[in-house]
């Protein structure tokens, strides 16, 4: 699974999309089905991404310190192209005013 900040953001996205679903679709079952259709592709992609890093959960103290420093080091060293490839994860936006559309 992705790290905690990503999960918190996903929870907020879920709440907004669920609220939009209930606002736009009067039938609760249909609204929940739309919520799932809209959210599932992104959530599955986030879970797949996080699964690549899940083997590193039981680290020692030194490893945790180094792992904690890596995002700051890698941000400086990362190329714009590599950072752009991650934009789907970090630059996702749910607009309250836009109608819901399931992913194609």
Image (cartoon, helix red, strand yellow):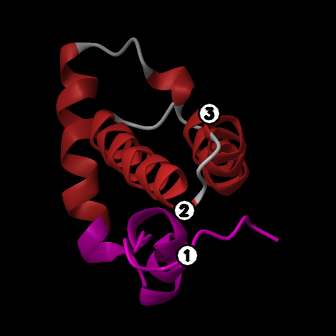
The residue that appears at 62% across and 33% down in the rendered structure is 51
Q: Secondary structure at mark 3?
A: helix
93 part of magenta stretch: yes
Provide residue 16's location: percent of width, then percent of height. Answer: 38, 54
Query: Depth check: 99 or 71 in front?
Result: 99
Judged by depth in the image, the label closer to the viewer, 3 or 2, is: 2
The circle drawn on residue 55 is none
Q: Is residue 73 left or right of residue 33?
A: left
Q: Nearer the viewer, mark 1 or mark 2?
A: 2
Give percent across and percent down for residue 86: 50, 69
Question: What label does residue 24 carry, if any?
Answer: 2
Q: Secondary structure at mark 2?
A: helix
Q: Magenta stretch: residue 22 in it?
A: no
Under tag 1, what secondary structure?
loop
Residue bearing mark 1: 99
Residue at the extreme bottom = 80
Gap in angstroms between the C-alphas marked 1 and 3: 31 Å
Callout 1 touching callout 3 (CB < 8 Å): no
């Amino acid at each position: 699974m992705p790290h905690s900040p990503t999960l918190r953001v996903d929870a907020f996205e879920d709440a907004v999309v669920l609220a939009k679903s209930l606002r736009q679709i009067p039938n609760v079952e249909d609204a929940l089905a739309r919520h799932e259709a809209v959210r599932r592709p992104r959530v599955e992609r986030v879970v797949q991404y996080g699964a690549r890093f899940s083997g590193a959960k039981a680290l020692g103290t030194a490893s945790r310190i180094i792992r904690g420093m890596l995002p700051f080091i890698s941000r400086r060293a990362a190329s714009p192209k590599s950072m752009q490839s991650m934009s789907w994860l970090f630059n996702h936006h749910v607009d309250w005013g836009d109608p819901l559309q399931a992913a194609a």
